[in-house]
Image (tube, helix red, strand yellow):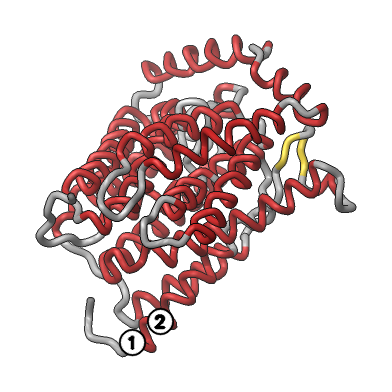
Amino acid sequence: MREKTSIANRRMMMFICVVMMTSSIVFMEPAPYDLLFVVLFVGAFLFGYVVFHEQQLWPFILLLAFVQANLISMFFSHDLLYALHYFLITFYLIMTWVLFVGLSSYYREGLFPPLFKAYTLAALVAVVAGLLAYFQWIPGTELFLKYGRVTAFFKDPNVFGPFLIPPALFALYQASKRDHRLFKSLSWFSLFVLLTMGIILSFSRAAWGNFALALGVYLLLIKGKSVNRLRPLFLIVLVAIPGLGYFITSPTVENLFQERFSIQSYDYSRFENQENALENIVHFPLGFGPGHSEIMLDFAAHSLYIRVMVENGVLGGIAFILFLLACLWRSLSLVLTSLDEHRGIYVVIFASILGIVFNSFFVDTLHWRHFWLLLALPWLKTDVRKLGG
């Protein structure tokens, strides 16, 4: 870390946490998170809180290729202003990735605990509001629900559900730490259960799959002297599964839960539409412009990979997919080679990224703020890493 006063470092860290605490309030644009991010971006670069290094070269090159593919595809767009608007949102989110890469390299592993705690607080506020609205314990419930599904302060339940998954894994990790007393572990586990309820009430099948995959990978990889691997498993089997089972079978939840688990009529047309969308690559190998799936295809892509391939062309699609694979590989390598004291948080990051990469097959995640945050976290500067115990 560069030589700065501890007070200055703490103040910057506090502001980063404030930005994260607003990340669940995104029903309007620009969201409070976006406005505060601009201040954070300028301040962090101005006062030297961002660090870049050679280990980050390849993701930067791949993102640069993706940006170039976006610009090239604009020449084939039907609505240039809309394409430019959509691209600028994408570019802004890439800048959030750039900033958090720089911040993580400055603070190193010291960034993760306060960042995730602020993220968890933001998720908790959203979940509490959503649960109160779902069970009609507060007025104005329609503000927090959409078609009977919890959205809280989000526009879409398909975004709300996945947003809760990284803090849910973080809460489970905190509950398993050996240096935590029983009351503290139970408090973190209660947070995990509460966030899980929020994921369920989003009634997003992609989010459920995301969570199942991320949780399974987390439980498979978490180990070491600093964590009690059996504690969360014991609590999940003894408390969470029976409690959530009762919750799911309650009259207010069961009907919509069964409906979401059944095959919907639009599921058949969705995959047929995606197959037809890929055929457009032959006619538009360089893409038909950012944000133009709905214009050119008359339907939403419902897949990140379909969107980038048809909108930004073969170059853009390949560059972006390679970027995602690089982020996955980087996060996995940190899990496999990190010291024991940091291994747990890297497992949370890897499992969260893997889950959202899976989620992206069924939902367009390109403009999700937390998607770009997660992809930035593995790229902190590392020196000598040793295999954890």
Residues under numbered marks 2 and 1 in contact, where contact means CB atoms less than 8 Å apart: yes
Q: For the residue labelled by badge 2, is the local secondary structure a helix, a strand or a loop? A: helix
- Residue at the image point whose x is 34% and y is 75% from the top: 45
Left or right of residue 42, residue 252 in this image: right
Residue 355 appears in the picture as rendered? yes
Relative side of 143 to 209, left or right: right
Residue depicted at x 31% and y 28%:
314
Q: Which mark is residue 285?
A: none
Whole-percent x, y for residue 69 in the image: 34, 39
Q: Name the residue under label 2.
A: 10
Q: Mark 1 points at which residue?
A: 6
Residue 83 in picture, x, y percent from top left: 51, 42
| Callout 1 amino acid | Ser
In front: 375, or 354? 354
Comparing 140 with 278, the one in front is: 140
* Residue in view at x 39 percent, y 28 percent: 309
